[in-house]
Amino acid sequence: MLEPRTTGAVPRRPFIPSQNLPMTARLLLIDDDARLTGMVGDYLRAAGFDVSTAGSLAQAREALAQSRFDLLVLDIMLPDGDGLDFCRWLRGDPRWRHQPVLMLSARGEPMDRILGLELGADDYLAKPFEPRELQARIKALLRRLEPKLDGDEVLRFGRLDIDLAARVARLDGKICDLTSHQFDLLVVLAQSPGRVLSRDQIMDALKGHPLEAFDRSIDVHISRIRAVIEDDPKTPRRVLTVRGAGYVFARKQDADGDAG
């Protein structure tokens, strides 16, 4: 069982971006306890995760600015601030509004858990904890956040279906007029719903396509995609622009009127 550090100051270490391994969930551990993050990081890497660490909120912000993560594992007590305030900041910023967060804390009282969840944490685990429980919670959370995929490999978002096997998108059952490149771009966005993807990240995900198909024309392709999947392309509710950051595919589009 891993217990929180009780004595001694731990020097901060700079964030080092990890490699972007295909089909591997990317985690960011935010905790200033170097002993704990070292052991947990090694354990999760052995389980197949791509793990990076940050020892302060400043380093966490730097890491988020550099890379996209599938999940943040966030401690509450950090040297330069409170993890609860950091979670509130995440939920208030459109770039990371939907960033999945699992909160860790030595404060395990019911009110602490309730407050963490009310501020937007997706799960809350008290220290000390068993590494196997942390791994199980991470896997369960990532499964819960995956796009809904039926037996025929169809991503479903309200009235919009994206059929991966047939390589067609349908709105209200009608096939959308998309080129092969545009369909692939739509799939890249739809497979990361609620997460802001920069143009560079989109280009990386589309490696293997002819460069001329996407070089300096992501915005043009997004406009053409919107023209066929949006009810009003000028006021999109499916593919949203985050100014200065990139694009995000909305998790909720039709069911409850929330495009976030």
Image: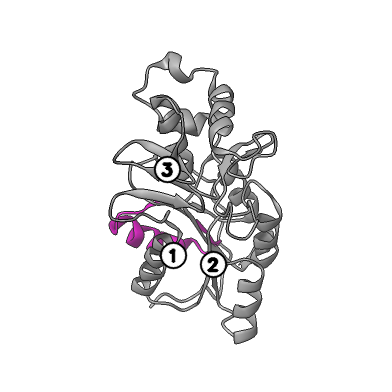
- List x then y, in percent, for residue 182: 45, 28
Residue name at image x 60 percent, y 86 percent = 110
Q: Looking at the picture, which amino acid does disc 3 mark?
A: Ser
Circle 1/circle 3 CB separation < 8 Å:
no
- Mark 2 / mark 3, whichever is N-terminal: 3
Q: Nearer the viewer, mark 1 or mark 3?
A: 1
Circle 2 residue: 122
The quarter of the image holding the N terminus is bottom left
Q: Quadrant of residue 254?
A: bottom right
Residue 152 appears in the rendering: yes
Q: Which mark is residue 128?
A: none
Q: Looking at the picture, which amino acid does disc 2 mark?
A: Asp
Along the viewing direction, whichever of 146 and 170 lies nearer the viewer: 170
The magenta segment: 28-50
The local secondary structure at tag 1 comes to helix
Circle 2/circle 1 CB separation < 8 Å:
yes
Circle 3 residue: 18
Residue 79 appears in the rendering: no
Q: Which mark is residue 141?
A: 1
- List x then y, in percent, for residue 31: 54, 62
The local secondary structure at tag 2 comes to loop
- Mark 2 / mark 1, whichever is N-terminal: 2
Q: CA–CA distance between discs 1 and 3?
A: 21 Å
